[in-house]
Amino acid sequence: MEVFGVAKGAGAQIFHVIDNVPTINPLLNRGVTPTSAEGNIELKNIIFHYPSRPDVPVLKGVNLTVKRGQSVALVGHSGCGKSTIIQLISRYYDVIDGSVRVDGHDVRELSVRWLRAQVGLVGQEPVLFNTSVRENIRYGREDASDADIEAAARQANAHQFILKLPKLKKLNERNT
């Protein structure tokens, strides 16, 4: 009987997850869709805690302005909110108080699908798949052309490194 009770509880949790309606749903594609993105980001007096731990503040009054083309490093100990800031910009979560703005638009007003298509992120410990460099980059945008892939590699300052990889060097020698 104890096993039945545990299974019943697990089943209830599964149905709770299935019935949960996300507050941020990129599939609905609602919101403002600007024609272009400049890349200016502003965080103003951000207050945030994760919904599962409302008693543990993560960000308390954070202010940050990043202008187009500017490089910024978020540095700090584990748990200080570096990844959380990226998740707020990409709108995986909404702030409790304050605002996150991209090109003057509050991210809560933007189409989530459009917003996430504008953000490219390589984490501290990126996952690479057992395929070509080209296909790994293409996972970020499946409809990317070869020119788009090369441009992404150049923007990430990885293009020259990629060209020096052994397999590519051998392929380049064969093609000349």
Image: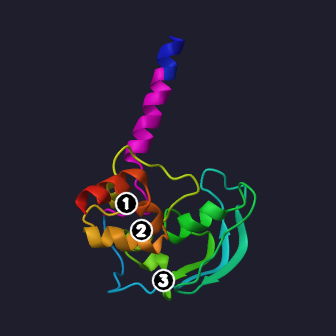
Q: Give the CA separation, mark 1 to mark 3.
A: 21 Å
Residue 86, relative to residue 170: is it above or below? below
Tell me the residue at 54%/64% (across/down): 87
The residue sitting at 41% across, 68% down in the picture is 153
Distance in Å between CA atoms under marks 2 and 3: 18 Å
Residue 23 belongs to the span the image colors magenta: yes
Q: Which of 125 and 47 is in front in this view?
A: 125
Residue underneath mark 2: 153
**Mark drawn on residue 39:** 3
> Which kind of residue does numbered mark 3 sit on?
Gly
Is 38 contained in the magenta span?
Answer: no
State the image coordinates of residue 20 (x, y, percent, origin top left): 42, 49
Image position of 83 (left or right of 157): right
Q: Where is residue 157 in the image (x, y as percent from the top left)?
A: 49, 71
Image spot of residue 27 (x, y percent): 31, 62
Q: In which quarter of the image is residue 135?
A: bottom left
The C terminus, quarter of image: bottom left
Quarter of the rendering containing residue 11: top left
Q: Nearer the viewer, residue 92 or 13?
A: 92
Q: Give the range drawn in magenta.
A: 7-27
Question: Contact, CB < 8 Å: mark 2 with mark 1?
Answer: yes
Quadrant in the picture for residue 15: top left
- Of the two numbered discs 1 and 3 in the rendering, the one whose residue sits closer to the viewer: 1
Give the residue at mark 1.
Answer: 137
